[in-house]
Image (cartoon, grey):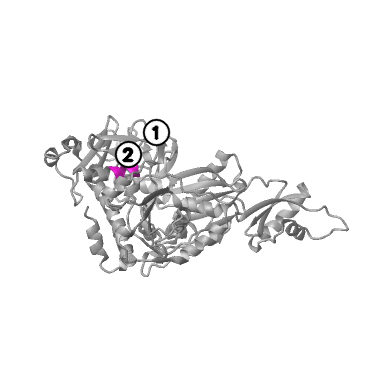
Amino acid sequence: MKTYAITLYPEKKVIRLPEGSNLFEGLRRHDVYINNACGGGAKCGKCKIKLNQNKSVASSTPEETACLTPQDITTGYRLACCIEVQSQMELEIINPESQPGSQLIDNCLPSIIRNPAVKKILIDVSPDSLKNNTPYLERIEEAAGMPFHPSYLAENLSRIPLLLESTPTKLSAIGINRQLTLVEAGDTATACYSVALDIGTTMLDAALVDLQSGKQVDTLSVLNPQRAYGIDVLSRISSCQHSQSKLKKLQQLIIKEINTLLKQFAIRADISQEAIYQLAVVGNSTMLHIFAGVNPRTIGRTPYGPIFSKAQSLKPTDCQIEISSGAEVLLLPSISAYVGADIVAGMLASGLTGSALSTIFIDVGTNGEIVLFTGSELLATSCAAGPALEGMNIACGMPALPGAIEQVFLSPKLEFRTICGGQPQGLCGSAVIDLAAEMLRCGVVDKRGKFVNKEDLLAGNHAHLARQLDKIKGEPAFIIHQDAKRQIYLSQNDFRQIQLARGAICSAICVLLTQAKLKPCDIERFIIAGRFGKSIRAESFKQLGIISKSFNGQIDYVGNSARCGAVMVLLNTDYRLEAEKLRQRVSTVELSTYPEYERILMRCLMF
């Protein structure tokens, strides 16, 4: 079969794709991440590439014309999912979300008394003599004060003779939960690290922790490469429901990205990956199943049962994680098919049950999990919120990175602020929430979420905003910023995504309150978790109706509480037990079977 060289800039990476193949699918097969929200269905317009003077590519398709502006097409922008490979190509992939330097809220890690499950100590094994011929295995166990874990024994039996050749008396012993998992040559006891990892549907968030000092050394965030197979968990479940090869592919994608994160941590901290002895993993149930290589198909069909929900302890070799062979890969416990370990960790980190205040915990993400604490009971549910409120799956959305607009005001004049200053690149989650709230307050959209026309705005109290209304790609749009390089705007379709997310969250809260026989006025505290910029405003949540306008209680923004909860488990093993206790306390409410839920949702879609 004839193939063509495809050169990817700016890396100048070259891949070869068969003649007649789809460019998007080809890039995905070669593990080249390209932004998308529809899995290559030519609907979202996110898989933008820029062709470098290639005249042999067919003219733009109707789908591209609908998603791209005429200026885009003229300057060489195309959609990868609409291109058939017929020649060599040079192209640049447009992924504005993949820049480093996240500027997120990260403030919920409490003061922790260190008592990690991982212990690394220096031991002295007496030299062999006729008077002391006790087997070395027993000497090591006696000196360390703990036995070998049966699952790790075979590897150590082959290692010990080699270690004794180089350092016959001094060894470093690693124990996890009071069982030895590895011995190392010499004194390496000061190098003892672990990693907390939140596998989100959209993003991966990780933290490197020094177990000897108890300090969080570094954090990293990257896009989940599984997004190429759809933006939500149902898309991922559908991808591997009838195909073990697709499941394996999804697992390989996530493992490869995690190993890249681990390598970056090691380089940045100047340590060996072999000095990482525990990986604590949280995420929704589908993400954890795929990570472990377990098909999540049962999560996607009635009665929506996961294969596992209790904590799972794996060896790194079980899932090809590149850390110490004596390490533990710990999957924290989940609650149900759609309320995962990320929520258990979030409850732990936010101190949800630490006071008697009636509290609503909202994890604003793709899956929109909500927990209600009545002061004694815990009720939880999840809803299909989508990632719009975090700045994803909208035309000009991006993570909270330098250049992202993070705060917006429309009155008395249009003003915005970007992260780290400089030219605006797009809208992060806090800006999306701000802008949607301001558009409602100023009458740019009506109570049904529909954009008003210019004439109505000119006749009202915010006539200065009429000039910001325009049509982009055939639909109404509100333009925030425009320069020679880009337009930053919120379209009617974007606002519908926000409206759906807001409606899903509000309807879930309504159901939980009804189930607990409480009213909105009974709530004393809100805890909001999510990937937000640091300038998120309570007023915007109130204007959108997620929080009642009359609410005067406590509002806590806790950022990525899931990752913080995983760090807590790494630093003190008591939190591992507490996570299991929390899991058992929670009662879940399934919205799909809740009486008249559709009516409640439709009501909550109105502003």
Q: Earlier in the sequence, mark 1 or mark 2?
A: 2
> Residue 448, how many percent across, how many down?
19, 52
Q: Residue at x 52, y 48 (%)?
A: 259
Q: Check whether the beta carbons of the residues at disc 1 and disc 2 lie within 8 A of each other.
A: no
The count of marks equals 2
Residue assigned mark 2: 407
Magenta stretch, main secondary structure class: helix
In the drawing, does residue 504 fall left or right of residue 558? left
Tag 2: Cα neighbours inside 10 Å, few (<14), some, or many (≥20)? many
Task: Please tell me whether residue 430 belongs to the stretch shown in magenta.
Answer: yes
The residue identified by callout 1 is: 420
Up-down relation of residue 538 to residue 587 (above or below)? above
Question: Which residue is found at the position 31% from the left and 56% from the top?
Answer: 505
Q: Amino acid at mark 1?
A: Cys
Could you tell me how far apart the alpha carbons at marks 1 and 2 are, in whole angstroms?
12 Å
When the figure is inspected, residue 298 is found, relative to residue 202, above or below; the finding is below
Please report the bounds of the magenta region as a residue range. Answer: 425-434
Pick the residue in front: 603 or 73: 603
> Most extreme residue toward the right, as rendered?
130
Res 307 seen here: no
Q: Secondary structure at mark 1?
A: loop
**Residue 412's quadrant in the figure?**
top left
Residue 357 appears left or right of 412: right
Question: Does residue 194 sit above or below 581 in this rendering?
Answer: above
Task: Judge from the rendering whether residue 544 lies leftward or rightward of residue 288; answer left or right.
Answer: left
Amino acid at pointer 2: Gln
Question: Can residue 321 be seen at all in this image of the molecule?
Answer: yes
Q: Quadrant of residue 408?
A: top left
Q: Position of residue 80 (x, y in %)?
A: 33, 44
Residue at position x 41%, y 41% from top? Answer: 98
